[in-house]
Image (spheres, rainbow, N blue to C red):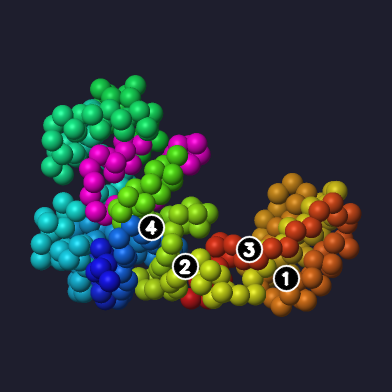
Amino acid sequence: MAAPVLEVENLVKVYERRGQPPVRALDGVSFAVPRGEIFGLLGPNGAGKTTLLKVLATLLRPSSGTARIEGCDVTVRPLEARRRIAMVLQETAGELLLSVRDNLLTFARFHGVAAAAARRRAAEVMEKFQIAAEAERKVQDLSGGMRRRVQVAKMFLADTAVLFLDEFSTGMDPILKRAVMGFLREEAARGRTIVLTTQILSEAEELCADILILNRGRQAARGDLNTLKLLSAGVADVALTFAALPPGVEAAVAALAPLRSRLDGNTVELSLKAEEARVLEIVAGLARMGRVLRVEVGGASLEDVFVELLRGR
Ligand SMILES: Nc1ncnc2c1ncn2[C@@H]1O[C@H](COP(=O)(O)OP(=O)(O)OP(=O)(O)O)[C@@H](O)[C@H]1O
Ligand SMILES: [Mg+2]
């Protein structure tokens, strides 16, 4: 079998700051990603996702452990590793003083794309991302969402083996986001390997073949969606729509200590970890509180899995 494109072994990153206690942002993370796969890194704020991507992208040195991109160790051969990757950072910047077009061209040239081809691809990509009208404007003068587009557009200018995307969809409108998800799937199908972080679980659910849930710098869970769902077996999603929201229903839901709950108009949504019979009992109990127009009971979503796996850690 071909070696994985990305190999991470026992990676540790401790941030040391004078006068402050050290922060162990990565505490022994290991995984491998084969060519052409979309790998998802999930986890709560501060879990270590950005730190991990920065180490992989050679922007930060790990305290210990190794990471290799197509066999290139990121600490031993950082420049060679760097040439194999393209990255969208969470705190997106871009070259603020350069125009949109020059941002794209500079990136393509760094990755060895010939000048004429770079110009052609830049034009195509600007079309795709609907930023052609901004081509000559400096990135610093663009709106946040437009800057994000420029940053993500760069990913498609050179055929780097690996793409790292840290919350790529932040600030993107839903239509563009849909399109970009399609572009990412196409890139993966062409053999590029993608690692992305997201807080939007439906994104991971749709895109990622394999998901690693990080918590406090360690792996909390790992697997494809089905495996993760099995790990939190027994979680059910319930939605009840009342003709009018009965008084006391909020308190009744809270008393059930659901994994999560939400009130949306006359609809009550909750996720519960309980035996099936108990779930039905609970639904029946809530339904007695008012006139019910609609009831839905479903299996766990990735969001339930996430909450369940991280609860009490
Ligand atoms: N430059 C730094 N110096 C010191 N500590 C840092 C630094 N950057 C991150 N940290 C700490 O390392 C931990 C991991 O942070 P990181 O940014 O990797 O988390 P994250 O999973 O990306 O979170 P988010 O979902 O909020 O983006 C946090 O405790 C954070 O405070
Ligand atoms: Mg982050």
Q: Where does residue 12 sit, x and y in percent of width and height? A: 25, 72
Q: Where does residue 6 sit, x and y in percent of width and height? A: 26, 64
Q: Which residue is mark 3?
A: 260
Which numbered disc flags the more N-terminal residue, 4 or 2? 4
Q: Which residue is mark 2?
A: 224
Label 4: how many Cα within 10 Å (few below 14, some 14–19, many 20+): many
Distance from disc 1 to disc 3, alpha carbons, whole Å, reads 10 Å
Q: Is residue 209 above or below residue 113?
A: below
Q: Nearer the viewer, residue 300 or 259?
A: 300
Q: Where does residue 295 sit, x and y in percent of width and height? A: 79, 57
Question: Image point 23% across, 29% down: which residue?
Answer: 120
Cβ atoms at labels 1 and 3 below 8 Å apart: no
| Magenta segment | 149-178
Can you tell which mark lies on residue 256?
Answer: 1
Question: Image point 24% across, 69% down: which residue?
Answer: 3
Name the quadrant containing residue 191: bottom left
Q: Give the structural element (helix, strand or loop) at label 1.
A: loop
Distance from disc 2 to disc 1, alpha carbons, whole Å, reads 30 Å
Which numbered disc flags the more N-terminal residue, 3 or 4? 4
Distance from disc 2 to disc 3, alpha carbons, whole Å, reads 23 Å
Q: Which residue is mark 4?
A: 38
Picture mark count: 4
